[in-house]
Image (cartoon, helix red, strand yellow):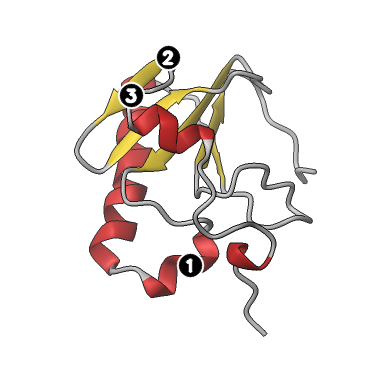
Amino acid sequence: MRITASQYHTPMEDTIFDRIIAGEMDADIVYEDDAVVAFRDISPQAPIHVLVIPRNRMQSIAEAPEHDAETIGRFMQGVALAARKLEVEENGYRVVLNTGRDALQTVPYVHAHIIAGRKLGWPPG
């Protein structure tokens, strides 16, 4: 059985990310283009902790099959371009997509975490 974010959040609930994209809320933006916005996390878990959100909203990556491949591809390209802009490619970085309650997705808007700037442990969580 496929579980989507809409099963645990109100489908059209306004989020902090909607307000950032609309320009109604300030964010420390490190990269943006016509497909994504990347900004520093307000509660960083590493020296570099940036969130990347697509301008074309979906609640979680679980909804990817309902979106066109170009939207998903542009989102993932945006993650890579933001990491390049942050200059973290040489030492490496982690990309995390939390999906659902058990993964502690706290905002019902798909977002990728770019985490870098220190050696990261494994396994995560």
At label 2, counting other C-alpha atoms closer than 10 Å, the crowd grade (few under 14, some 14-19, many 20 or more) is few
As shown in the figure, which amino acid type bears the numbered disc 1?
Glu
Quadrant showing the C terminus: top right
Which mark is first along the chain, 2 or 1? 2
Asked if residue 76 is positioned above or below residue 18 in the image, the reply reads below
- Name the residue tied to disc 2: 28
At label 1, counting other C-alpha atoms closer than 10 Å, the crowd grade (few under 14, some 14-19, many 20 or more) is some
Asked if residue 3 is positioned above or below residue 57 in the image, the reply reads below
- Name the residue tied to disc 1: 63
At label 3, counting other C-alpha atoms closer than 10 Å, the crowd grade (few under 14, some 14-19, many 20 or more) is few
Residue occupying image coordinates x 52% and y 32% = 16
Which mark is first along the chain, 3 or 1? 3
Mark 3 lies on a secondary structure that is loop
Residue occupying image coordinates x 61% and y 43% = 107
Cα–Cα span, label 1 and label 2: 27 Å
Foreground mark, 1 or 3? 3
- Name the residue tied to disc 3: 23
As shown in the figure, which amino acid type bears the numbered disc 3?
Gly
Quadrant showing the N terminus: bottom right
Residue occupying image coordinates x 27% and y 51% = 74
Furthest toward the bottom, the residue is: 1
Pinpoint residue 120: horizontal percent, then vertical percent: 68, 30
Asked if residue 77 is positioned above or below residue 6 in the image, the reply reads above
